[in-house]
Image (cartoon, rainbow, N blue to C red):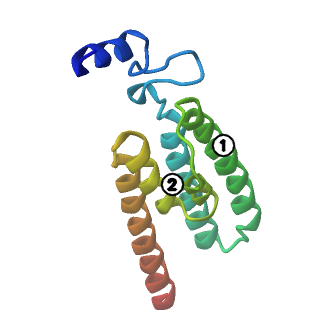
């Protein structure tokens, strides 16, 4: 049996076919809704925290509520990744350091860095707004 026939046998037996049995999805079918929802929750948390700073109220409760929302959405996103058959300890970065998780997710899942770039831009804007608020507060 030559190499071409052997390779055709493997392909005909489904060895090189993407699995799509409900648990393993092809890479291009991973749902990115939860990662984008995760970023929206982060941005919303920043806005609530800025509002709390401007109003002079404690933001501990707001931070805890948003942490719970982020944790839920993170596990939903992780579930989508597991359905695609992608595993690894890198996923736990999502709980502790968001940009590291988004970087590894992009590299291992779909090579789409838009969620990471969006998160980083919003983070930088958040720092700039916080510095601006501090400068305004010190002047007044």
Q: Left or right: 86 with respect to 27?
A: right
Residue 100: horizontal and vertical position, in percent? Answer: 48, 62
* Residue position marked by numbered label 1 in the rendering: 75
Q: Mark on residue 43?
A: 2
Q: Residues within 10 Å of mark 2 (few under 14, many from 20)?
A: some
Residue 130: horizontal and vertical position, in percent? Answer: 48, 75
Q: Residue at x 58, y 39 (%)?
A: 77
Q: Is 81 rendered above or below residue 12?
A: below
Q: Left or right: 5 with respect to 84?
A: left
Q: Residue at x 77, y 62 (%)?
A: 61
Q: Is 125 rendered above or below residue 65?
A: below
Q: Left or right: 54 with respect to 28?
A: right
Q: Residues within 10 Å of mark 1 (few under 14, many from 20)?
A: some
Q: Residue at x 73, y 71 (%)?
A: 58
- Which element is circle 2 on? helix
Q: Residue at x 37, y 39 (%)?
A: 110
Quadrant in which the N terminus appears = top left
Residue 11: horizontal and vertical position, in percent? Answer: 35, 15
């Amino acid at each position: 049996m030559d190499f071409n026939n052997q390779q055709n046998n493997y392909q005909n037996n489904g060895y090189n076919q993407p699995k799509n049995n409900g648990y393993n999805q092809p890479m291009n079918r991973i749902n990115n809704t939860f990662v984008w929802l995760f970023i929206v929750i982060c941005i919303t948390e920043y806005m609530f925290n800025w509002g709390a700073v401007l109003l002079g109220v404690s933001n501990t409760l707001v931070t805890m509520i948003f942490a719970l929302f982020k944790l839920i959405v993170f596990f939903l996103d992780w579930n989508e990744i597991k359905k695609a058959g992608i595993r690894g300890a890198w996923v736990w970065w999502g709980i502790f350091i968001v940009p590291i998780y988004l970087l590894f997710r992009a590299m291992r899942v779909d090579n789409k860095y838009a969620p990471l770039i969006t998160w980083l831009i919003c983070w930088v804007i958040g720092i700039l707004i916080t510095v601006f608020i501090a400068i305004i507060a010190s002047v007044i």
